[in-house]
Image: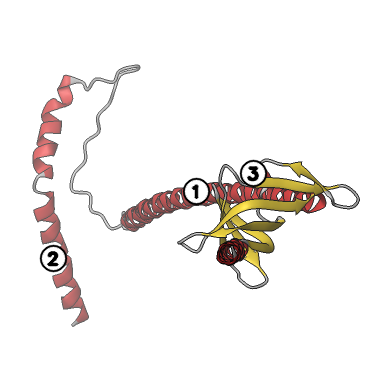
Amino acid sequence: MTYNKKLGITSGTTLLFTLLALGSTIVCAQTKLEGVIKGRSGSEIILQTADSPKVIVLLTDSTDVAQVVGALKARNKKMSMAALVPGLPVQVEGTYNAQNQLVASKIRFKGNDLEQAQAIQAGLSETKQQAQQNKEDLEKQNAALAAQNAALKEQQAALTEQEKKIAANKAAIAANSARFGQLDDYYIIDELTVLFGNGKVKVDPKYAPQLVALAEKAKTVKYEFKLEMDKQMIVGNVQTK
C-alpha cells in the first residue's frame, strides 16, 4: 500500500509539473503590444510601437476586433476589420509565427481614437485628391503652354519669311528708284507718232510699215548707243586736253 501511494503522489506531481510547463509555454507565446497603425495592405498591418518602428501584424478570420466603449471602458463593441485604418492606436494580442509576424488573436481600440483616425484619413484623402487635381491642372497648363510656344515659333518663322520678302521688295524698289532717277540720261534715236481715230484702239494699217521699220531700227540701238557714248568720251578727252 505504501508503494502505491508513493507512486500515485509521484505521478500526480509529474502531471502538475507538465501542466505548469505547458501553461508557462502558452503564456510566453502570447504577446501583447500597443502601437499605432502606420499602414495596411489587405490582411497585413504595419504597427509602430515604442520599441519597434515596424511590426507586421497578420489578421485572420478568427481575429477578434472590438471597440472599447462605456464610461469605464469595460464593454467591447464588435467591429469590422475595415475599422483598422492607419493612424489608429490599438492594442494587439497574438503569437509570432515562423516569419516573426504577429498573428493577431485580439485587437482593441477606443472609440474616440477611431473617430480621430477616420478624420485624419478623410483629410489625407481630400488632400490626395486635391494634389492629384493640381497635378492634372498643371499638366494641362504645361500642354497649353507647349502648344502656345509651338504656335509662337510658327508665327516667328512666318514673320521672318515676311521680313525677307519685305527686304527683297525694298531692294527691288530701290533698284527701280535708281533706274528711274537715271531716266534723264537717255538719247532719242528715232520716234514715230501714231494717231488713233475716236473710240478706236486698233492701229491703222497705214502705220504698219513705219512700225516695222522702227522695230528693226530698235535692234541696233544698243550698238549705236555705245558708239555715241564712245564719241562723247573721245570729245570729252580732247576738250580736257
The image quadrant that residue 209 belongs to is top left
- Counting residues from the start of the chain, the first of labels 3 and 1 encountered is 3
In the rendered image, the quadrant that contains the N terminus is: bottom right
Amino acid identity at mark 3: Met
Q: Residues within 10 Å of mark 2 (few under 14, many from 20)?
A: few
Q: What amino acid does circle 2 point to?
A: Lys
Residue 142, position as x, y percentages in the image? 52, 52
Residue position marked by numbered label 1 in the rendering: 143
Tag of residue 120: none
What amino acid is at disc 1?
Answer: Ala
How many dots with numbers?
3
Look at the numbered disc 1 and give the secondary structure of its residue.
Answer: helix
Say if residue 120 shows up in the picture.
Answer: no
User: Which tag is nearer the camera, tag 1 or tag 2?
Assistant: 1
104 or 109, which is in the foreground?
A: 104
Q: Residues within 10 Å of mark 1 (few under 14, many from 20)?
A: few
Residue marked by disc 2: 231
Q: Is residue 38 left or right of residue 220?
A: right
Q: Residue at x 41, y 49 (%)?
A: 154
Instruction: Provide residue 236's location: percent of width, then percent of height.
Output: 20, 73
Q: Can you identify the residue that label 3 sits on?
A: 81
Check the image and name the residue furthest to the top.
199
